[in-house]
Image: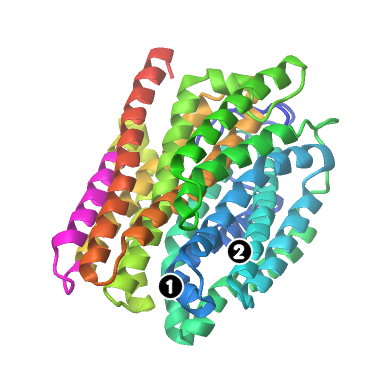
Amino acid sequence: MPNRSPDTLPDHPGPATAGSGAPSADDSRFDAAGRRVLAVCMAAGFTTLLDQSVLNIAISDVRDSLHADSAQIAWIVAGYSLAFGLALVPGGRLGDVRGRKWLFVAGLALFTAVGALAGTAQSAWVLVAARLLQGAGAGLVNAQMIGTLQDVFTGTRRARALGLYVLTGGLSTALGPPLGGLLLALAGPELGWRLTLLLSAPFGLATVVLAARHLPAPRPSARHSDLDAVGLALVAALTLLVMLPFIRPPGALGGAAFAVAAVAVALAFAWWQRHYARTGRHPLLHPALARSRPYALGTTVAMAQFGTSIAGSLIQTMFLRDALGLSALATSAVALPAALAMAATSSQAGRVVQRYGRSAVSLGLGLSLSALLTAGLAGLYVPGSALPYVLACTQLAQGVSSGLIVAPNQAFTLRHAPAEAAGVAGGILQMSQRIAAAVGISAVSGVYLRGATAGLLGHRDAYWHATAACAAVVLLALLLSLRAGRTAGTAGG
C-alpha cells in the first residue's frame, strides 16, 4: 500500500490533506457522495464481520446435523478467520495496483456465492472448504474497504469513517449470537443453522449492486505491488502449526513436534523479512512497524482482545447449549447484554479516552479479565438454574470492556505507526487480529471439547479451564497495555 498519513484517530482528527479544499465550518460532515461510499462500506463490513459470530450460536446444531468431529468444528469456525486474515494484506496491495472498486465487488460476490454453498453443505468438510473460501472473499472485501475509506476521505472525515468501520465490526460481532438465536428459534435446528449462513446472501447481493453503482472508479495508486508471497506463506504455516496441536486427531504427532516446527518457521520468517527488505522490496511486515514498540504492543493487545472475545463467545455458547441444555434463543439472550453494552459504551468511548487517555484501554482489559474469571468460577460453582443470569451479567461487563478497548486501542496503535508504513499498518493490525482469532478458537475450543466429558461436572470443569486460558491471555494483554502506556508517554505520544 502507498504511504498515508497515520491520522486515523477518532479522538485526534488531523487537518485535511492537500487537495481536499478549504476546510468547512464542520470538517467532519460527509457530502452526499461520501455518505453513499460510507454506507456501502459499512454495509459490506457489517455483512462480512457478522458472518463469523452469527454461526457460533448454531455450532452445536451444525455438529449434530453434519456429524462433525471436534477437528472439523474447529476448522469450520477458525478457518473463516484464518483465510480472512491472510487475504487482507495481499488484497490491499492488489487494490493499490489495480484499483479497489472491482476487487471490492469480486470479493463480495465470492463471499456471497460461497455463503450459499456453505448454507446448503451436506458434509462437514464441504462446509470447511466453503468457510475458507468465504473468509478469503471477506478479507479481500475488507482490504478494499479500508483502502477506499482512506482514499476518499481526509482529515476528520477519514477519522470518523474509520471509527465507524471499527464500531460496525464490534457491533456485528456482538449482534451475531442474538440474531442467530432468533433464526434457530423460528426455523428449528436443522434449517436454522443453514439460515444463519444464508443470512448474508440478500445483504451481500444488495451491497454488490450498490458497490458497483456508488464506489469511485478504479484508480490505481501504486505502479508495483510487492506481495511477499513467501512471507505470507510462512505466516500461514506458522499459524497452522500453532493451531494443529489443539485440533489434531488422537494418535497424531505430539505437541512438541509442532512446537519445534513452529519455532523453525518463525525464525525463517524473521530471516526472510530482513532479506526481502535488503533487496529494496516491501516485506509483509514493514521493518518500521517492527521497530515501533508502541505499535507492536498495541497490535498484541488487539490480538489478545479479539482472539479471546471470539473464542470466549464460542465456548460459552457450547457450554450453555451442551451442558445446561438451553435453547438457542435462551443462549442468545445471555449474549445480548454484551451487544447492548458495547453499543452504549462505544458511543462514549471518545470522551472517556479524552479524559483518561490510554488508561481507558487498560481499564477495559481489567474489566474483561474480571468478567472472564467470574464467568469461569460461576461455571464451576453456581447452580444451573441461576447460571444463565450470572453469565448474562458477565456478558454485560464484557460488552462494556469491548467498547473501552476496541476503537481506542486501534486509535492509539495507529497513532504510533511510522509514517513510511502508515499505509500497511491498518492491514497488518487487522490481519493479526484475524489470525489471533483462528488460533484462539482452535486452542480454547480444543481445551473445552477435550475436557467436556459426559455429565454436567465434566462440562463445568472444561468451561473453567477454557475460560481461565482466555483470562491468562487477557492478563498478558493488560500488562502489555500498561507497558504501552508508559512507552507512549516516554515517546511523547
Amino acid marked by disc 2? Val
Q: Look at the numbered disc 2 and give the secondary structure of its residue.
A: helix
Residue 368 within the magenta-colored segment of the rendering = yes
Name the residue carrying label 1. Answer: 60
Q: Residue at x 37, y 61 (%)?
A: 449
Task: Determine whether 423 is above or below 450 in the image.
Answer: above
Q: Is residue 80 left or right of residue 451?
A: right
The number of callouts visible is 2
Marks 2 and 1 sit apart, C-alpha to C-alpha, by 15 Å
Q: Is residue 451 visible?
A: yes
Q: Residue at x 50, y 60 (%)?
A: 71
Name the residue carrying label 2. Answer: 128
> Whole-percent x and y of residue 297?
44, 27
> Whole-percent x and y of residue 156?
57, 36
Indicate the quadrant containing the C terminus: top left, top right, bottom left or bottom right.
top left
Which image quadrant is residue 177 in?
bottom left
**Crowdedness near tag 2: few (<14), some (14–19) or many (≥20) residues, C-alpha within 10 Å:** many
Q: Give the residue furthest to the bottom.
A: 187
Amino acid marked by disc 1? Ser
Q: Is residue 222 left or right of residue 379?
A: right
Which image quadrant is residue 324 in?
bottom left
What secondary structure is the stretch in magenta mostly built from?
helix
Indicate the quadrant containing the N terminus: top left, top right, bottom left or bottom right.
top right
Q: Residue at x 77, y 17 (%)?
A: 280
**Crowdedness near tag 1: few (<14), some (14–19) or many (≥20) residues, C-alpha within 10 Å:** many
Q: Which residues are magenta?
A: 365-387
Task: Determine whether 417 is above or below 171 in the image.
Answer: above
Along the line of sight, which residue is nearer the eye, 470 or 162?
Answer: 470
Q: Residue at x 63, y 75 (%)?
A: 121
Along the line of sight, which residue is nearer the eye, 281 or 339?
Answer: 281
> Whole-percent x and y of residue 250?
46, 57
